Amino acid sequence: MIYLKIENGKGYFFKEPDQWIEIDQIGKEDLLTLLDKAIADDFEMNDYDAGLLQNTAHQIIYKHLFQKFNELVENKSRFKDESEQLYKSAIEKYTEAIQASGDV
């Protein structure tokens, strides 16, 4: 699903339910919601193109959001693998400790 788009010379972000809000109106809660979507969903965005954005504020905001979300989406599987590996070693450590103490 597309969460950031460029249309009619302006940048927009998707806000549920089915609202497109101008990018310069984005708030902290909106960013957190988009972050959750980028991690959990099939997160898509229109590519950044300064020529399509007529508003300078929209250019700056959209460019930075696009870069950060693109980086997150590209590295999502690496982040997931690293976190699973981190938890796997912790689970193994505590399982061994429990078994050694005889509490099983």
Image: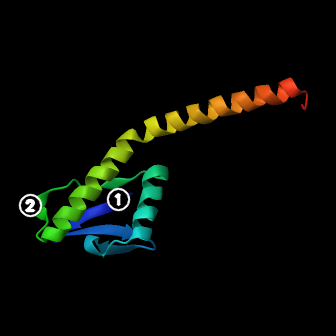
Mark seen at residue 51 = 2
Q: Earlier in the sequence, mark 1 or mark 2?
A: 1
Q: Amino acid at mark 1?
A: Ile
| Residue 94 image offset from top left, x and y in percent | 74, 32
Quadrant in which the C terminus is drawn = top right
Quadrant of residue 63 within the rendered picture: bottom left
The quarter of the picture where residue 20 lies is: bottom left
Q: Is residue 21 left or right of residue 102?
A: left
Q: Which mark is residue 43?
A: none
- Between 15 and 28, the residue placed more toward the observer is 28
Residue, x 23% and y 62% (percent of image)? 62
Name the side, left or right, on which 40 lies relative to 61: right
Of helix, strand and loop, which one carries label 1? strand
Kindly tell me whether residue 80 is visible in this rendering: yes
Question: 25 left or right of 9?
Answer: right
Cα distance in 3D space between marks 1 and 2: 20 Å
Q: Position of residue 95 (x, y in %)?
A: 77, 29
Q: Quadrant of the N terminus?
A: bottom left
Residue drawn at (70%, 28%) of the image: 92
Residue occupying the point 42% across, 51% down: 42
Q: Residues within 10 Å of mark 2 (few under 14, many from 20)?
A: few
Location of residue 18 with respect to 71 vertically, above or below: below
> Looking at the picture, does residue 30 appear above or below residue 2?
below
Return the residue at label 1: 2
The three-letter amino acid code for the residue at tag 2 is Gly
